[in-house]
Amino acid sequence: MTTRTTTVELAESLESALQLVNDEDRRNALTLTRLLGEGEPVEAERLAAALGRSGPDVAKALAEIPGIYRDARERVVGSWGLSVFETPHRLRVEGRELYAWCAWDSLFLPVVLGEEVEVESTCPTTGTRITLAVSRESVSDVSPPTAVMSFLRPGEEGFSGDVIRSFCHFVHFFASPEAARTWTAEHEGTFQISIADGFELGRFWAAQMFGVGTDR
């Protein structure tokens, strides 16, 4: 099986797992994620103002959308891969420090945010520091250059429920293919892909989920 075929099949799996299906949903997700990308939790009133909708309408919509995490004050602190609270995947964006839920999120969020992002993570197998630069168009400056990533096909429930626990905990950067194989051998359902393929899947996801960038 070629890498291209594998990437297409993964894109089809991701598309099947997608819960948001219309332009309004995509606009809501894009607006919320970009507001969160400013580095602070997002109140429903702030999102409502950005969308030109009423606060109660937006609060109701947020309650129905999977992939949204809120704090005790009902402010959004995590939205479809992006977090203002610390995770193992650090993002530096124009002087702001943000975080991704998993390695793959750090590859599509620059497309969604429309900004170049410096990514820093750690290989779970070797403890090696991994860095890369991601823009809307490409991935560059990958260090070490042998780095790859793990991936997991979405389950039957797609990305509903606790997506961080069911998906993100299985998607990491690794210092080398050997390091990735050691980890995936111990985690059923996971496999390794190149960072370049992860980025192309990310661009596809950004188009399908947020309505930005390009599809496959």
Image (cartoon, rainbow, N blue to C red):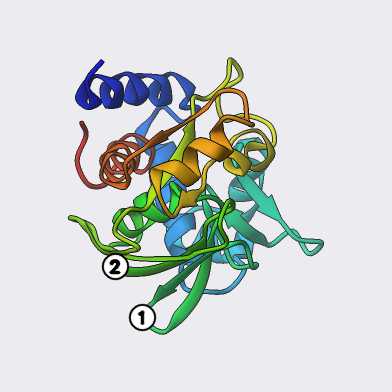
Q: Amino acid at mark 2?
A: Glu
Mark pair 2, 1: CA separation: 8 Å
Q: Is residue 208 above or below residue 74?
A: above
The answer to whether 28 appears left or right of 70 in the picture is left
View extreme (bottom): residue = 95
Say which of 32 and 109 sits in front: 109
SS of the residue at dot 1? loop
Q: Which mark is residue 115?
A: 2
Residue at image coords 68%, 62%: 75
Residue at image coords 25%, 40%: 200
For disc 1, the neighbor class at 10 Å (few under 14, some 14 to 19, many from 20) is few
Residue 52 visible somewhere in the drawing:
no
Residue 2 visible somewhere in the drawing:
yes
* Quadrant position of the N terminus in the picture: top left
Query: Marks 2 and 1: CB-CB under 8 Å?
Result: yes
The answer to whether 24 appears left or right of 211 in the picture is right
Q: Which mark is residue 94?
A: 1
Q: Is residue 95 above or below residue 28?
A: below
Q: Amino acid at mark 1?
A: Glu
Residue at image coords 27%, 43%: 203
The answer to whether 86 appears left or right of 29 in the picture is right
Q: Is residue 170 above or below residue 144?
A: above
Counting residues from the N terminus, which is met first, the one under dot 2 or under dot 1?
A: 1
